[in-house]
Image (cartoon, grey):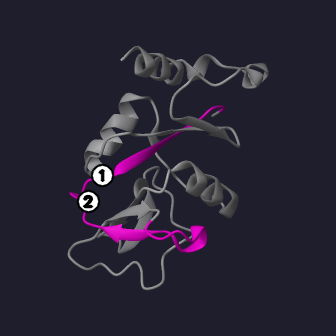
Amino acid sequence: MHYRRGCLSWVSDINSLNKTDLNLPLPICIIQYFNYSIYYISTETKTWNKSREDCRQRRSDLLIINSKEEQDFIEKFRRGQKAWIGLTYNKTEGVWKWVDGSALTTKFWRSGEPNGKGNEDCVVTGYVSDPVQSWADFPCDNKFVWICEKRIFE
């Protein structure tokens, strides 16, 4: 438990960092750093909503993927597991949106996805091993690991 507490306190204190602190070693936990964001991947599985709650308790949110470089980074980081990301289908507007309300522009859907079968309104990355065709839509009540992202300098 001490191992996890150290990791979580480091994440919660991230807002106090400045740019010179980026050379400090990362704590021993499942956290990675890329392009002014830090990422946490869970070791347990939860529904999409419970996963987002966990991220928000860490003062972060579910992952928003903005580029191919970030998608490639995440694919190496997720340890071969399907993982929730911060993308959902907005039924009212009929569009896919990120948790920050931004529209989906960069896409890494698996061929044939999104298919919307069975009320599939949430998205995992890692459905297949090809990083540029890795996303699939799933019912939000399914349980997967998840990835939180915290922008360091907002």
Tell me if 147 is positioned left or right of 138 in this view: right
Give how far across and how far down residue 29 sits, in percent. Answer: 51, 28
Give residue 48's mark.
1
Magenta-colored stretch includes residue 20? no
**Eyeballing the image, is 109 above or below 13?**
below
Q: In this view, does 85 lie to the left or right of 105?
A: left
**Separation (CA) of disc 2 from disc 1:** 5 Å
Type of residue at label 2? Cys
Q: Position of residue 6 (x, y in %)?
A: 48, 16
> Callout 1: helix, strand or loop?
helix
Q: Residues within 10 Å of mark 2 (few under 14, many from 20)?
A: many
- The residue under label 2 is 140
Verify CB contact (< 8 Å) between mark 2 and mark 1.
yes
In the structure shown, which secondary structural element does the residue marked by tag 2 occupy?
A: loop
- Compared to 10, does 90 lie above or below? below
Residue at image position (47%, 49%) is 100
Depth check: give the residue in front, 115 or 95: 115
Name which residue type carries label 1: Trp
| Left/right of residue 78 with respect to residue 82 in the rendered view | right
In percent of width and height, residue 142 lies at 23, 58
Q: Does the magenta stretch include residue 152?
A: yes
* Figure quadrant of the C terminus: top right
- The stretch of residues the image draws in magenta is 127-153
Q: In which quarter of the image is residue 13?
A: top right
